[in-house]
Image (cartoon, rainbow, N blue to C red):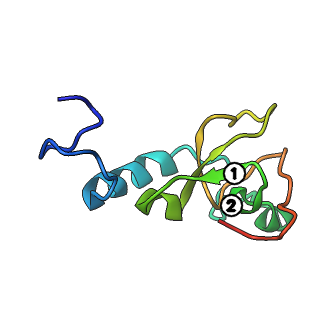
Amino acid sequence: MSGAQAVSGGPWTGDDRAHNDACHERWSQQQNRSTRQPGYRDEWYDEQCGGCRYWVALSRELGRDWGVCTRIGSEFDGRVRFEHDGCELFVMREDGSFG
């Protein structure tokens, strides 16, 4: 069985709550910015990944909070990022949407 298949032998759907919760916990450890950090700056609140034009949401359940950075030059290019994280190369979406 390939890694792309669920235990039942069918195609992986991404709808496994325990798996998704474990991913969220593991990936959260890699945040660049967190509102809980003592040095969190107020201006970062409006410059979160979920509002960046280069952040592409994952599909299904994980896509509610997680996406991939596609910003050339960013240290996070090609990496999964939490929608409330951020970096120095943030570019606001033209339509002002988030997530």
Q: Are marks 1 and 2 in contact (CB under 8 Å)?
A: yes
Q: Amino acid at mark 1?
A: Trp
Q: Residue at x 66, y 46 (%)?
A: 32
CA separation in Å, label 1 and label 2 = 6 Å
Q: Which residue is mark 1?
A: 55
Quarter the C terminus occupies: bottom right
Disc 2 packing (10 Å; few <14; some 14–19; many ≥20): many
Task: Report the disc number at residue 99.
Answer: none
Name the side, left or right, on which 42 lies relative to 58: right
Along the line of sight, the residue nearer the viewer: 31 or 59:
59
Q: Earlier in the sequence, mark 1 or mark 2?
A: 2
Residue 11 vs residue 78, the one in the foreground: 11
User: Secondary structure under badge 2?
Assistant: helix
To which residue does mark 2 refer? 50
* Residue lying at 58% horizontally and 51% vertically, measured from the top left: 67
State the image coordinates of residue 87 (x, y, percent, origin top left).
Answer: 77, 47
Q: Secondary structure at mark 1?
A: strand
Observer-nearest of 47 and 78 = 78
Query: Which residue does the image show at 75% across and 57% down from the upper left?
Result: 39
Picture quadrant where residue 50 is located: bottom right
Rendered location of residue 56, percent (x, y) = 64, 51
| Placement of 71 over or under 15, stated as above or below | above
Count of marks, rendered view: 2
Horizontal side of 51 relative to 16 (left or right) equals: right
- Would residue 53 appear left or right of 7 to someone viewing this image? right
Query: Residue 14 appears at what percent x and percent y?
Result: 34, 53
Name the outermost residue toward the front.
10
With 66 as the anchor, is 22 left or right in this view? Answer: left
